[in-house]
Image (cartoon, rainbow, N blue to C red):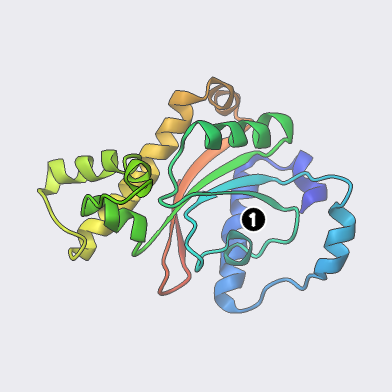
């Protein structure tokens, strides 16, 4: 797929991600020799997308989307939120390295989201969870206060967090906003279901 990237549009790359998730679900991933990939990518990389995801160990993006070494940039932080460092990484991926797709991927039953819903206070986790509280506040405003025992509430907060962060990328990165306006880059939110392996895209 790397060789095709210059000719592919952001929408076509997104479609490749959807097809990759379908292969994952069907149990029919493409055959890859990772040692060959190591040699092929040793002198450079041209990933076609950057995926912002949670650190949760059950959702490695390369596996979920059936990608190989060098195919995607991975930015991971508990709760899949955007900050200055993540934005800088996205700008590098898109403006410097030519990636055309930004995926913001949340997931079901997210521990960070649950902790934010319950207003957990613990060391550096406290300041980290502050990045998720806008989503909690937004859902609370429409549904009322709840705890992490309310699975539907947690799911709504996880989705809202994805949507808020896709918006924040445009608001806080003029570089990416310009590329999006020129249709050079597309930003898409999505949600991974830990129980089924399905990725729902918000495009």
Q: Is residue 171 left or right of residue 66?
A: left
Closer to us: 136 or 190: 136
Q: Is residue 131 above or below residue 191?
A: above
Name which residue lies at 49% across and 57% down: 55
Name which residue lies at 21% across and 57% down: 153
Q: In this view, does 162 lie above or below 185?
A: below
Res. 129 image quadrant: top left
Q: Is label 1 in a helix, a strand or a loop?
A: helix
Q: Is residue 133 left or right of residue 88?
A: left
Residue 156 horizontal/vertical position (percent): 26, 53
Residue found at the very far front of the displayed protein: 123
Residue 39 horizontal/vertical position (percent): 90, 59
Identify the image quadrant of the N terminus.
Answer: bottom right
Residue 29 horizontal/vertical position (percent): 68, 73
Residue found at the very far left of the displayed protein: 144
Closer to us: 189 or 15: 189
Closer to us: 146 or 31: 146
Name which residue lies at 72% across and 46% down: 47
Q: Name the residue under label 1.
A: 16
Q: Please state the total of marks drawn on the protein image.
A: 1
Name which residue lies at 43% across and 25% down: 171
Res. 151 image quadrant: bottom left
Res. 99 image quadrant: top right
Q: In this view, does 1 lie to the left or right of 143?
A: right
């Amino acid at each position: 797929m790397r060789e095709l990237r210059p000719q592919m549009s952001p929408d076509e790359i997104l479609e490749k991600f959807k097809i990759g998730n379908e292969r994952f679900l069907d149990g029919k991933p493409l055959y890859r020799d990772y040692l060959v990939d190591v040699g092929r990518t040793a002198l450079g990389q041209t990933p076609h997308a950057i995926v912002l995801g949670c650190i949760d160990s059950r959702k490695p993006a390369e596996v979920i989307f059936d990608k190989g070494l060098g195919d995607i940039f991975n930015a991971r932080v508990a709760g899949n939120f955007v900050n200055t460092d993540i934005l800088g990484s996205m700008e590098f991926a898109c403006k410097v390295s030519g990636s055309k797709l930004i995926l913001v991927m949340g997931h079901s039953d997210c521990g960070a989201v649950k902790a934010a819903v319950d207003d957990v206070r613990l060391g550096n986790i406290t300041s980290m969870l502050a990045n998720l509280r806008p989503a909690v506040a937004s859902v609370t405003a429409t549904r009322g206060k709840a705890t992490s025992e309310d699975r539907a509430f947690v799911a709504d907060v996880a989705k809202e967090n994805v949507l808020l962060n896709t918006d924040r990328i445009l608001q806080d990165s003029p570089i990416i906003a310009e590329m999006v306006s020129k249709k050079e880059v597309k930003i898409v939110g999505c949600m991974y279901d830990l129980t089924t392996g399905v990725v729902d895209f918000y495009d």
